[in-house]
Image (tube, rainbow, N blue to C red):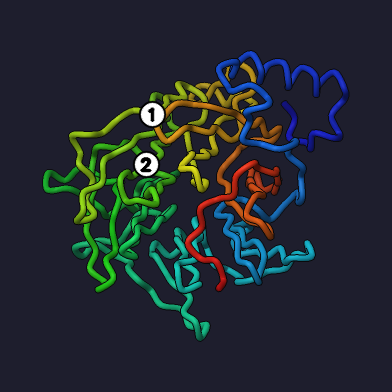
């Protein structure tokens, strides 16, 4: 599938895309029960590679082209922070912007006065790989993933046996850092803690040949550690591109960005288009799928005046679609 916006595709291509998506995801719910209202619309053709996050006054921030970019409430775009080197972004409950800076290999926070605070850049004396995404629980503990994509020669994270580690970490309010997942996940990418702190979801997205492309769920203990014995497979994307960023709505449903529309053999293949937003019930059952006609679907975020707009980043482009239920967000702006 060529990387072009849907409205510019020939009618036959649009029909073929829709039919293939429907065949692949025939288990999705009926239209009248869909979590989506309408079809996705492309808002931007560049500048939105990852990390979408909504702020009620600023609008939407995204990571793209090395910067943190802003799309304001009127739809005007600008560079919010140049040379940020960012991937995952998140506003905490105080409205401070948390940043996974995979260029400088650290997690940062922009404070209320605009100053930059490095929350962590190493663990037990070793620098992180590429901090990728982050989430916050009800006790304001920050969880983040630390995969390594591309060149692995500079990796410093090793376990006691000298094996390379792509882990998941927790930053407590006192600043202490704990590794909570070491090898249970192949290459952790997106993650999220449910609003009741009951579960931790982790996207396992190793895009190398034979790598895992799975969504895992762990029971989360009161101390902020996952119960590793409860590791449960929610979905396996097989040989297509695996899960990336994810968000929750107010009913506890999980929206996961994943998939490809064009194969990248031999490591990533797709029998027909698989790129889009996969929706899972609180019980872990896939209940809907929204096809995005652009490679590759990387992340999503709720926003808009009523919280019922889902913004989707895909191959540098930005899309939006209306949802029936508003999203769960930490910062309300009040």
Q: Is residue 17 above or below residue 145?
A: above
| Residue occupying image coordinates x 34% and y 53% | 154
Q: Is residue 103 above or below residue 197?
A: below
Residue 268 bears which disc, if any? Answer: none
Judge whether residue 217 can be spotted in this image: yes
| Residue occupying image coordinates x 56% and y 46% | 299
Task: Report whether 110 appears left or right of 222.
Answer: right
Which quadrant holds residue 236? top left
Q: Is residue 160 above or below residue 259?
A: below
Give coordinates of residue 223: x percent, y percent: 19, 56
In the rendered image, the quadrant that contains the C terminus is bottom right
Query: Mark 2: few, some, or many residues within 10 Å (few <14, many ≥20)?
Result: many
| Residue occupying image coordinates x 66% and y 36% | 36
Which quadrant holds residue 23? top right
For label 1, the SS is: strand
Residue at which label 2 appears: 201
Give coordinates of residue 245: x percent, y percent: 50, 45
- Foreground of the two, 259 or 174: 174
Which residue appears farthest toward the bottom when viewing the image?
A: 113
| Residue occupying image coordinates x 32% and y 68% | 120
Give coordinates of residue 267: x percent, y percent: 48, 25
Disc 1 and disc 2: Cα gap in Å? 9 Å
Give coordinates of residue 253: x percent, y percent: 49, 39
In the rendered image, the quadrant that contains the N terminus is top right
Q: Are marks 1 and 2 in contact (CB under 8 Å)?
A: yes
- Foreground of the two, 268 or 219: 219
Q: Is residue 218 above or below residue 14?
A: below
For label 2, the SS is: strand
Task: Report whether 155 appears left or right of 87.
Answer: left
- Foreground of the two, 196 or 172: 196
Residue 234 bears which disc, if any? Answer: 1
Judge whether residue 245 can be spotted in this image: no
């Amino acid at each position: 599938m060529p990387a072009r916006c849907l409205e510019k595709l020939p009618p036959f291509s649009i029909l073929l895309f829709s039919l293939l998506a429907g065949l692949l995801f025939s288990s999705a719910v009926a239209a009248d029960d869909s979590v989506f209202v309408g079809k996705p619309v492309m808002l931007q053709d560049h500048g939105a590679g990852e990390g979408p996050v909504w702020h009620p006054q600023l609008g939407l921030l995204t990571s793209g082209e090395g910067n943190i970019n802003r799309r304001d409430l009127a739809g005007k775009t600008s560079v919010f922070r140049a040379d940020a080197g960012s991937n995952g972004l998140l506003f905490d409950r105080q409205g401070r912007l948390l940043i996974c800076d995979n260029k400088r290999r650290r997690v940062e926070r922009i404070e209320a006065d605009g100053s930059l605070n490095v929350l962590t850049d190493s663990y037990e004396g070793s620098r992180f790989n590429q901090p990728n995404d982050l989430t916050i629980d009800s006790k304001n503990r920050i969880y983040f993933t630390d995969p390594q994509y591309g060149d692995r020669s500079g990796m410093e994270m090793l376990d006691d046996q000298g094996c390379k580690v792509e882990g998941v970490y927790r930053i407590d309010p006192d600043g202490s850092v704990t590794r909570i997942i070491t090898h249970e996940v192949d290459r952790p990418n997106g993650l999220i803690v449910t609003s009741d702190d009951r579960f931790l979801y982790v996207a396992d997205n190793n895009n190398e040949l034979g790598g895992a492309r799975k969504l895992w769920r762990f029971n989360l203990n009161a101390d902020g550690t996952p119960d590793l014995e409860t590791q449960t497979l929610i979905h396996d994307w097989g040989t297509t591109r695996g899960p990336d960023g994810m968000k929750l709505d107010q009913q506890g449903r999980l929206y996961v960005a994943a998939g490809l529309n064009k194969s990248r053999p031999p490591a990533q293949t797709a029998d027909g288009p698989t790129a889009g937003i996969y929706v899972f019930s609180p019980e872990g059952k896939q209940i809907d799928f929204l096809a995005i006609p652009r490679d590759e679907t990387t992340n999503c975020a709720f926003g808009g005046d009523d919280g019922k707009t889902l913004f989707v980043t895909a191959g540098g482009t930005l899309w939006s679609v209306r949802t029936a239920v508003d999203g769960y967000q930490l910062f309300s702006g009040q």
